[in-house]
Amino acid sequence: MEMQKENFKKDFENFKKAFNPEALSVAQKSLTLEKRGNVALIIFDQFEEKANKLSGANMLRIFELLTQVEDDKTNKALVIISRKPTIFIAGADIGEIRMFGKDNSATENLMKLQSVFTYLDFLPIPTIAAIHGACMGGGTELSLACDYRICTDDPATKIALPEVMLGLIPGWGGTQRLPKLIGLEKSLDMILTGKNIDPRKAKKIGLVDKVVPVEFLEEKALKWAEELAAGKGKPPEKKKELKEKLLENLPGGKWVVIDQARKMVMAKTNGNYPAPLAALDVVKETFGGDIEKGLKVEAQAFIKLVTTPESKNLIEVFYLTERVKKDKGVEGGVKGRDVKRAGVVGAGVMGGGIAQLFAAKDIRVRMKDIQWDAVAKGYKAAEKVFRKKLERRKMTAFEFENAMERIEGTTNFSGFKQLDLVVEAVVENMDVKKKVLAEVDTLVNADCVLATNTSSLSVSEMAKAMKNPKRFVGMHFFNPVDKMPLVEVIRGAETSDEAVATVFSLSKKLGKTPIVVKDSPGFVVNRILCPYLNEAATLMTEGVPVTRIDEIAEKFGMPMGPCALLDEVGLDVGGKVSKVLYGAFGDRLKPPAVISVIGDTGRLGKKTGSGIYQYEKGKRKEDTTLYETLKIKKGGTELSDEIILKRLIYLMINEAARCMDEGLVRDAADIDIGMIFGTGFAPFRGGLCRYADSIGAESVVADLELLAKKFGDRFAPCQYLQQMAVSKKKFFN
Amino acid sequence: MKAWLAKDQKNKVAVVAGVRTPFAKSGTKLQHTSAVHLGVSVARETLAQSELKPGEVDEIVFGNAGTPADAANISRVIALRSGFPQSTPAYTVHRNCASAMEAISQGCLKIGMGLTDAMLVGGTESMSNMPLIYGEEMKELFASLNFAKTPMEKVEKLTHFRPQWLKPVIAIMEGLTDPISGLNMGQTAEILARDFKISRIEQDQFAVRSHERTSKAMKEGRFTQEISPVSVEPGYEEVLTTDVGPRDNQSMEALAKLRPFFDRENGTVTAGNACPITDGAVALMLMNYDKAKAEGKTILGTIAAHAFTGCEPKRMGMGPIYSSHKVLEGLGMQLSDIDLFELNEAFAAQVIANQRAFASKKYCQEKLGRSEALGELSDDKLNVNGGAIALGHPVGATGGRLVLTLLLEMKRRNVQRGLATLCIGGGQGGAFVLERE
């Protein structure tokens, strides 16, 4: 070991030269070493930043401090702690990761960084990570290299290895040390899903040894360090469950676990995401083996992944979500209202769903409908969502009751004068909506923001019913409200910045991802999705089997195929939207007759038990007699998968270009956010526009022209796209 | 003790809003709905109707007789679950059947003297959810098991167990028994029936009329304004909008079939001519009158006076005459100055007994020291929309219902003054005089 350390040190002096001196000086200010008696304390407090990140410079600084700790022989134990209020370590610096793969010596460099934690691992004194707040990725790997972990019971404390979400795997020993610490099955669960582990669970699975209140974290950690220095206070070794023991120790047991995990990954990702599969390969190859060899395998796999388009795209998507976090929805300093009390007009499933969202975020909500029966449906819709959380122990019985009591049903407008915001969620009918909004407009206070939850009706047209159209804005939730993350905030012709900002920040408070869209038929997401769904129906009419259409889309990375999606949305609801779009944009968006033909027989989709598919206890099944009933001859065998896919996806690209041309959104990023969070458009492709960029406008236009010749004018590339092709422009520049 | 009189106060007290839940016979629609949820339903709706901001309400007081184990100060739980700020204090009062009236009286005191400007007061009761209690032996066994140090010691303790110890004490039966006289409430009504020679037939006739009047009021939608429907726990499958209990087909024949409940041999009081145990809640928003007026609030009425009095526990049913006398005396008014009456129908016998006593010069002279009778509680002015025999009597809430129902009926009839009074288990009476402008 001694020799190796000297090599480490020399290596790092050389490595240091590759870094910008300014970064090194910031790292020096961010990571400091203090001494408390015979305990060394490394304090992480990133200079002039909110979050602690493990940049390369910070890693070097940590190494430097570790050598200092070791050189001072009076140090008998080490504690590493953060000074940030809600963050231990947020992980590696993603900006640096993006640059990583470009270097030829990437693997070697990564292994140097790995060795910082190896050094920590082999430090001869007891080491403790004192964790409060988010402990992500590299932060978790740092804590794993410590001998012990103590964390706070604060809700801000969560531990995760979220690398797979960026198309990567843990690269600083996470795939090595975690399985060793908590076992194969549990570690794979963390590594393959990237999910957050709360303090209670962390203790249970042995990820941390102790859980303490945040106020006493440092005190307890130091005291424990002293005990450990004195050779006391070692936590008892966690006993493994019998099942775990068997699976890990029996010959072949390991393969069973990994095999099962692989099956799960394949089912969830269709094989479209290389990272979890790579993680499995690494663990399979290295589990139970020598750590140094294991680290090398891990580093090689990591570097391979960094350069994949999937990872690049997922990192772009990460940046998109970061952008939403900072976004206010409006330019300039206009602030929205803080919404403490809200109203929902129109109970039922949608209204109840919206009320549930409010109640879950501590916003009291008055839920109004004409009849108490309807109010009851709203209550039930909200209760169902909360009940599930209760059953999954995501909330306690008390929290459940508190939350339900925040929903106040009514059949008159009592109390509406006190509300900060009212969301109208009555039936999708212009006359009804206008009538209701006109009434609400006169009932609420002047400073109340009014929103309409509509999927396709014109916000500007509705505004005409109101005396004060400035305060009126669209708030398009997607169904089911509790699950779908997107909200389209629709700016009507007269909508004020304040109204937009209010609904935008409220959407974020509700845990949703909002985009601001100009009022236009179908807004953006449904508008772009519509030609895709229509084309699926056209393909059906041509005899292409439903299952083939859906499989092709799923293979591309859509969460479900277009036919299944039509069923999910409901053929009646989908039909309504597509009619609006047909009315607005003409033949290009003409809905194929087959949708209404099926719908007219009462087969409206999942909700009625059958639509394009059949449903048994909510499970989708092919209806083998569908084409016979529709008098369609099965066929389409002459169409290649590629052609079918292009017919589906390129139509969306074409429509997205039109949205850009019409200035419905600020930029292509908004469209990508909308498509990813509104329709589940394959995140590993980076979003619809980014996918188009990866093909290139020229190629898309050329293909669309071919498709137009063969299958009809709806494929004719729009002017904006043609322009892009000519000037070799991209959606993202 | 003197009556509380509005004219002696710094501030007048106005009722600006009020609602009640539907009243549901225990063990029916609301059997799994907690007293807290019932209270929250009316509290938040009353707040909404008052158009006050939660922070503008100074204090919350609820009456509740059968304290739920998980909500010892139920007012505070209701207040916080209803969205009142954590800085707003709340307390619970208990005066048996007059608990909600006591809550209103607390509002009168505090607003009257200027401590508060707005108070949410009311009452809530889930008689379906009154606990079953283990007897002493069982309690002791649990305690000794707790103290046992070794498993063997535990086993030893358990050998003392006798199955009959599992027989629960039913809290509701204990609660409805007067601990001074040892009489059940029904038995106190039997005494009144004998005192005033009230026959079974008279009592049954009264009960039928109560159902008729209540059913008619329901059909004509007269309770629509006062009822705030309540979402039904635990599954939130439905919202209960109407009272459960009143029968539009209650008949003398059906009532005649019932056996006397409290005195099987010679009794006259049956389950049919007594009020059923019931679940329900009520809330009222009280405000400083001047402030309410200045803010343009709807004023349902003002509270002119109220009084509580004591009487013989075994004749607790006579409470109303004592308290009514006191409140009228304080106001310097005659019974004839009152346009409308609500007298809680704990038992038909007890209402009839009061009617007779009110009209009896002898009774009033002997018991109240008056020179003349109080006067006639005529059928056309008394409980015009029926009462507790049909609607039920959720102990902690009823007092509030009487006041609310009375105020709304006074408006409907466009009369100026009304009196709400009730008898209180343990031997008390409470009475409120309400006025409209």
Image: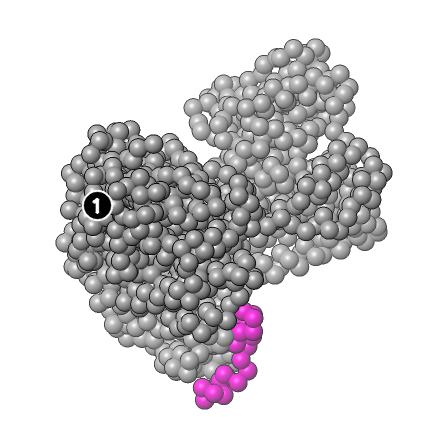
Residue at 53 percent across and 80 percent down: it is A623
Q: Position of residue B181 (x, y in %)?
A: 53, 43
Q: In which quarter of the view is residue A727 placed?
A: bottom left
When the figure is inspected, residue A680 is found, relative to residue A444, above or below; the finding is below
**Residue bearing the label numbered 1:** B334
Element marked by disc 1: loop
Residue A279, position in %: x, y?
65, 48
Residue under the image location 49 percent in, 79 percent down: A544
Task: Pick the quarter of the image with the N terminus of chain B.
Answer: top left
Q: Which residues are magenta?
A: A614-635
Residue A54 visible in the shown view = no
Where is residue A228 shown, x and y percent of the image?
Answer: 73, 20
Q: Look at 44% across and 29% down and name the residue there.
A: A50
Q: Residue at x 62, y 56 (%)?
A: A265
In this image, A420 relative to B41: left or right?
Answer: left
Label 1 neighbour load within 10 Å: few <14, some 14-19, many 20+: few
Q: Does residue B328 sit above or below A347 in this rendering?
A: above
Left or right position of B34 against A728: right
For residue B256, above or below residue A97? below
Q: Determine if residue B432 is in view.
A: yes
Q: Is residue B263 magenta?
A: no
**Chain letter behind tag 1:** B
Considering only vertical position in the picture, is B311 above or below A560? above
